[in-house]
Amino acid sequence: MFARIARQYRRFLLASVIFTVMIALAWLTTPIDIPEGLYHPVLGPLTWLILLILVIGLPLIVITLLLPGLLPVVELWLLTFLVMALLQPFLRSVDAPFWADCLVLLALFLVIERLLYGPWLSGFARRDVAPKTGFLTLPGTPEELWPRLCPTPGQISEYYWPGATILPAPEGSTADFALSLPRRGAAKDDLATVTYEEKTYPTHARFRTEAMSGSPTPTAVFDIRLTKLDEGRCRVTYSQAFENVPLGQRLFFYLGHTFRDTLASLRARLTGRRDWSLQGAQMVKRP
C-alpha cells in the first residue's frame, strides 16, 4: 500500500510545481500581504512544504487509495487553475460575473482534458517508449511460471490477469490469437492481438500485443526470460516497450510509474500476496 502511494511522487512534484506557479501568478497580479516570517530562509520553505503536503499530498494519497481512476484529474485541474490564473486579468477587465468565471473554468478543464489525455492531440508527437526492464525472484520453476507470465492457449486460466480469455485472431490477421483482459467497473477492457516473435519453452518468450479497436493500451513488445535458481525459485527478467504512444499517454505512464506498478502487480500475483498496485485495482476479482 505504501509503495502504491510512493509511486505517485512524480505526480506530487508536478502538481506542487504547478500549484506554486499558480500562487506566484496570483500574488503578482493581486497584491497579497505575506507575513514577514515566511521570508525566513528556513521557516518560509518549511511552511510552504507543509502547505504542499496538506493541499497536494493528502488529497493525492486519498485518491490513490480510494479512487485511483481519478488520478489524472489531479494534474488536469491544476493545469486548469493555472490557465485560469493567466486569464484573470482579462476577465477582471471585462467585469465578468462570477457565473461566467465558473463556465470558463469548466470549459478550460474540458479543453485541457481533450488536449492532454483525450483525442484532440492523440496523433501529435507520437513515438516509441524506450524498453524498460525489471527483475523478479519468484517461487516456482520455469515450467510453472511460463503460463502465468506468457498468455498460452489451453492454459489461459493460469495467466496472472484474472478472467483473461483467448479469442481467435481477427480475419486477415497474422497474429497467433487475440487476448482479452477484463477490467473492473467503468475502466475499458483490453483487447489485443498477440503475436509470438520468439518462443523457447520454458525459458524465453518475446511477443507483441497490438491493441484492437477501443482498447486503451498501445502496442507493446514483451520480452520475458526465466532462469531457474534452485528447486523452488526462479529469476524472471521482464521487459516491456510501448510503441507509437501519444504525448499525453507517455506523460500518464511517466507520472504513475506504470512499469514499476506492473512489476509490483506481477510480484504480488505470482507470490500469492495481496495486490496493492494500481493495475491490481483495475483487475476483476477471481471467482
Image: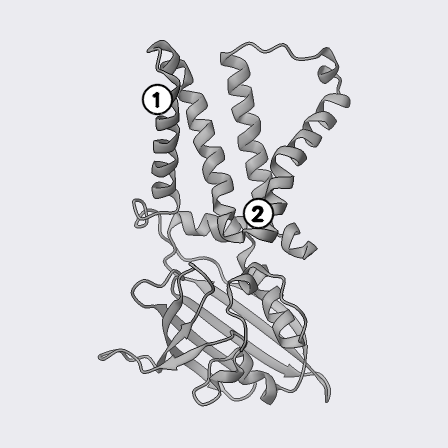
Coloring scheme used: one colour
Residue found at the very far right of the displayed protein:
42
Looking at the rendered structure, which numbered label has been put on residue 67? none
Q: Is residue 9 visible in this depiction of the protein?
A: no
Q: Which mark is residue 63?
A: 2
Position of 53 with respect to 100 (left or right) is: right
Amino acid carrying mark 2 in the image: Ile
Between marks 1 and 2, how big is the CA–CA gap? 29 Å
Q: Where does the image place residue 191, in percent across and percent down from the top left?
A: 37, 70
Residue highlighted by disc 1: 100
**Residue visible at 55% across and 15% down in the picture:** 27
Q: Amino acid at mark 1?
A: Ala
Residue 230, quarter of the rendered image: bottom right
Q: Quadrant of residue 11?
A: top right
Q: Secondary structure at mark 1?
A: helix
Q: In this picture, is 195 found above or below 239? A: below
